Image (spheres, rainbow, N blue to C red):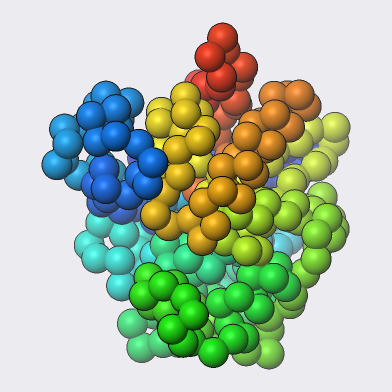
Amino acid sequence: MHHSSSAVRQVGDLTVWAVSDGELAADLSVFSNLEPEEAGRLTGAGRFDHVLLPVNTFLIRLGPHFALVDAGAGPAGGPALGKVVENLERIGVRRGEIRTLLMTHLHPDHSNGLVDRDGHAVYPEAELLLHAREAEFWLDGDIDGSVSERTRRNMAAARHATAPYGGRIRRIEDAEQVLPGVAAVALPGHTPGHTGWLLQSGGERLFLWGDIVHFAKVQTARPEVSLVFDVDQAAARAMRTETFERVVREGLAVAGAHLPFPGFGTVVRVADGYRYRPDGP
């Protein structure tokens, strides 16, 4: 196993690998309600520096089958991204062995990796599970002037990425038990159908929370800080705090798409709020 590109956790009978898609370059302008100086202090980045955002996907072995949580940014993301397939191969898993795709949401850094450069399905055997509200927002409506330019671009990308899965898209609802030991948890805000996946097996649990947090150092210290990527910033802020409260209260281990690789850890309460604690190796 290539330590820099995957890491593994056992959750009862379920084996979960973090599989890196690479890193996305962003800059401090992605924060929508944080002074650049404060963003720089919290991230350790200079005001005009790029900050690298890890993009993690998660592979779950359920008996003989594999499920993949999110597909990464794919080849369209540039040379620093699109590494999921090669990192799956490093742990001995071929694309055709993935039977289920569990999408947290349809933003490009999670869904563009569903298709190759020619627009063909990367996972030809997989059923794609997506929250009904997420599908409605990105795939069903007209792409028109009622949404922002960013959202229009992302709608077009989401339609392109999901097109070859047409007859294999299953729209799921809140709290649905979608596979043995895997339940959907609605986390709307970042996107309308943003979904976490709660794994439960043998008395152990792991909560794959998608994009509750993009920058751990910033948003656990300051949960009110939102990003320009949030479709509904107020709802995303409220959901982040609600989720922190839940994982602290229940002592839930978490795994995040943009937490520092491999993205496994816990949230702890501190005097002035919360902090993210990555798991040890």
> On screen, 151 above or below 117?
above
Q: Residue at the far front: name it.
A: 146
User: Is residue 55 shown left or right of residue 273?
Assistant: left
Q: Nearer the viewer, residue 69 or 86?
A: 69
Residue 239's place in the image compared with 241, above or below, is below
- Quarter-of-image position of residue 33: top left
| Quadrant in which the N terminus appears | top left
Residue 197 is at least partly visible in this image: yes
Query: Which residue is more in the foreground, 120 or 232?
Result: 232
Residue 49: % across, % down: 16, 40
Q: Is residue 210 visible?
A: no
- In this rendering, would 43 be left or right of 98? left
> Which quadrant of the structure image shows residue 274?
top right
Q: Measured from the top left, where is residue 144 in percent x and y?
A: 46, 87
Residue at 25% in and 56% down: 80
- Above-or-below relation of 94 to 221: below
* Relative depth, front residue between 147 and 110: 147
Query: How many labels, in total?
Result: 0
Q: Is residue 163 left or right of residue 34?
A: right
Q: Quadrant of residue 66?
A: bottom right
x, y percent for residue 2:
39, 43
Q: Residue at x 17, y 36 (%)?
A: 47
Q: Residue at x 55, y 57 (%)?
A: 232
Residue drawn 52% across the image and 21% down it:
275
**Height in image: 242 above or below 44?**
below
Locate residue 118, reporting x and y percent. 36, 88
